[in-house]
Image (cartoon, rainbow, N blue to C red):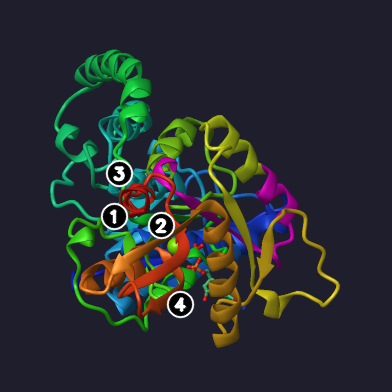
């Protein structure tokens, strides 16, 4: 995609209160900005015991920010704090470009990622709930029809409306959500099963999900295949060295201290993971609060009825942990997504896991049917193909997806 990235300056204040988590939360903010297609051009931080009530940062810092906006030709400022409506408008007046906070940024990412009707409704509800108290007073700038980070999704069309209209809209969405969730269960059961083995990447932001996705899929060259004709942009094809072609899907990822009003909206972004044959739970092995991250992810999988989906835990960033690292989740593999050997280790671990999930097959394919052999190589783990002279066929053994056609293919041929 060659779309123009917005230039973003991040602002954070290290206070007595947030001291311990400050660094990691700024890192996360940068990561989230990237996810929202923004380019971080500068990070401005300030140390003060408390944030300034009017403008969050102090007067001198604000002047510095104005100059930075100029120097970097920034389009957007993202504050690592929840802004009151008044702070928001004061800041926008001072810097002359759009100012949003952490919550708006996260909402924006969710708006980009929500796929289903229910997901879109959840995000819209959260956006409107956020907007509602901000429409009093001067509020935030209402002329955001242009879109861009923090102004995408349904919110932008509502900006010309007033509080009453928004309340009415919220009540409509609540009603529709009720109806949609009544249908959800049934449609989940009817969900299309795919012949392609699907792998989802989950885990906290900054764990290395996107790095792993790129590591595994970057060097691949293969012919287009119509099985994969309708991939969404967050899904990539990955061909294992032995030939099996699978899909890998990236997700938004968990966020530290997710504001409670966004929890539902976040859950809805994980819906696509409910279709997966295997989840790779990526964990930053070097993160200080790693155990808590792991627990949060496991709890959510339970909440979303995904306990039955097989999970392989990928402890990432092995280069940043000492050799006495003790894993807590099993099965697992410990790698660095920044190394070639990491790619090999992970590929082997995933292949092994896929074989466990798939079911074994064994049958023979007439020698005239070379296309069948090719298909087996691409869509299954083909372990042996043995040519038998007398029968003039290939005796094949391997593993295939449980609900695939190969099971029946075998029965038909024998
Ligand atoms: N040291 C180290 N850094 C890594 C490793 N894998 C990823 N990173 C870095 O961690 C940061 C977050 O990675 P990213 O893939 O964007 O995480 P995501 O939010 O889970 O998609 C990036 O700066 C990566 O370069 C690793 O194995 N070792
Ligand atoms: Mg990512």
Whether the magenta-drawn stretch holds residue 155 is answered as no
Rendered-image quarter of ligand 1: bottom right
- Find numbered disc 1 in the image and state the secondary structure of the residue it sits on: loop
The CA span between labels 4 and 2 is 30 Å
The CA span between labels 4 and 1 is 27 Å
Q: Which residue corresponds to the image point at 28% horizontal and 36% vertical from the top-left?
A: 116
Q: Nearer the viewer, mark 3 or mark 4?
A: 4
Measured along the vertical axis of the image, is residue 216 above or below residue 201?
below
Whether the magenta-drawn stretch holds residue 283 is answered as yes
Q: Nearer the viewer, mark 4 or mark 1?
A: 4
**Ligand 1 under 8 Å from disc 4 Cβ:** no
The CA span between labels 3 and 4 is 27 Å
Left or right: 272 in relation to 344: left
Q: Nearer the viewer, mark 2 or mark 1?
A: 1
Left or right: 394 in relation to 3: right
Q: Which residue is mark 3?
A: 111
Q: Which residues are magenta?
A: 274-295
**Disc assigned to residue 270:** none
**Disc assigned to residue 149:** 1
Q: Which residue is mark 2?
A: 78
Determine the residue located farthest toward the right in the rendered image.
324
Near-viewer residue (21 or 79)? 21
Q: Nearer the viewer, mark 3 or mark 2?
A: 3
Cβ–Cβ below 8 Å for labels 2 and 1?
yes
Near-viewer residue (216 or 266)? 216
């Amino acid at each position: 995609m060659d779309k123009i990235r917005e230039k973003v300056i991040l602002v954070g204040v290290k206070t007595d209160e947030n001291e311990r988590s400050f660094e990691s939360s700024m890192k996360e903010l940068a990561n989230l900005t990237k996810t929202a297609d923004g380019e971080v051009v500068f990070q401005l931080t300030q140390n003060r015991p408390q944030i300034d009530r009017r403008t969050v940062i102090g007067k001198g810092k604000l002047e510095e920010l104005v100059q930075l906006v100029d120097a970097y030709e920034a389009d957007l400022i993202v504050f690592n704090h929840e802004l009151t409506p008044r702070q928001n408008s004061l800041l926008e007046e001072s810097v002359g470009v759009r100012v949003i906070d952490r919550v708006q940024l996260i909402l924006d990412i969710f708006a980009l990622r929500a796929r289903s009707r229910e997901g879109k409704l959840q995000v819209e509800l959260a956006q409107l709930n956020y907007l509602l108290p901000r429409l009093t007073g001067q509020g935030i700038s209402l002329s955001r029809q242009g879109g861009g980070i923090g102004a995408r999704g349904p919110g932008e069309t509502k900006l010309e409306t007033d509080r009453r209209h928004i309340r009415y809209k919220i009540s409509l969405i609540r009603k529709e959500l009720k109806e949609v969730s009544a249908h959800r269960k049934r449609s989940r059961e009817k969900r299309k099963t795919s012949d392609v083995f699907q792998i989802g990447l989950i885990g906290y932001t900054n764990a290395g999900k996107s790095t792993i996705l790129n590591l595994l899929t970057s060097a691949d060259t293969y012919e287009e295949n119509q099985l994969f004709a309708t991939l969404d942009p967050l899904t990539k094809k990955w061909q294992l060295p032995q030939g099996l072609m699978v899909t890998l899907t990236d997700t938004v990822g968990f966020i530290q201290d997710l504001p409670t009003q966004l929890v539902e909206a976040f859950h809805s972004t994980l819906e696509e993971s409910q279709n997966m044959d295997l989840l790779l739970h990526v964990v930053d092995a070097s993160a200080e609060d790693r155990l808590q991250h792991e627990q949060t992810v496991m709890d959510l999988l339970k909440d979303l009825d995904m306990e039955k989906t097989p999970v392989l835990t990928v402890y990432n960033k092995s280069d940043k942990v000492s050799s006495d690292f003790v894993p807590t989740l099993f099965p697992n593999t410990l790698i660095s997504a920044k190394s070639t050997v990491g790619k090999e280790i992970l590929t082997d671990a995933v292949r092994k896991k896929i074989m466990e999930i798939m079911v074994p097959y064994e049958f023979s394919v007439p020698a005239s049917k070379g296309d069948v052999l090719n298909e087996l190589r691409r869509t299954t783990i083909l372990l042996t193909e043995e040519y038998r002279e007398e029968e003039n066929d290939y005796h094949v053994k391997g593993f295939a997806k449980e609900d695939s056609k190969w099971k029946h293919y075998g029965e038909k041929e024998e």
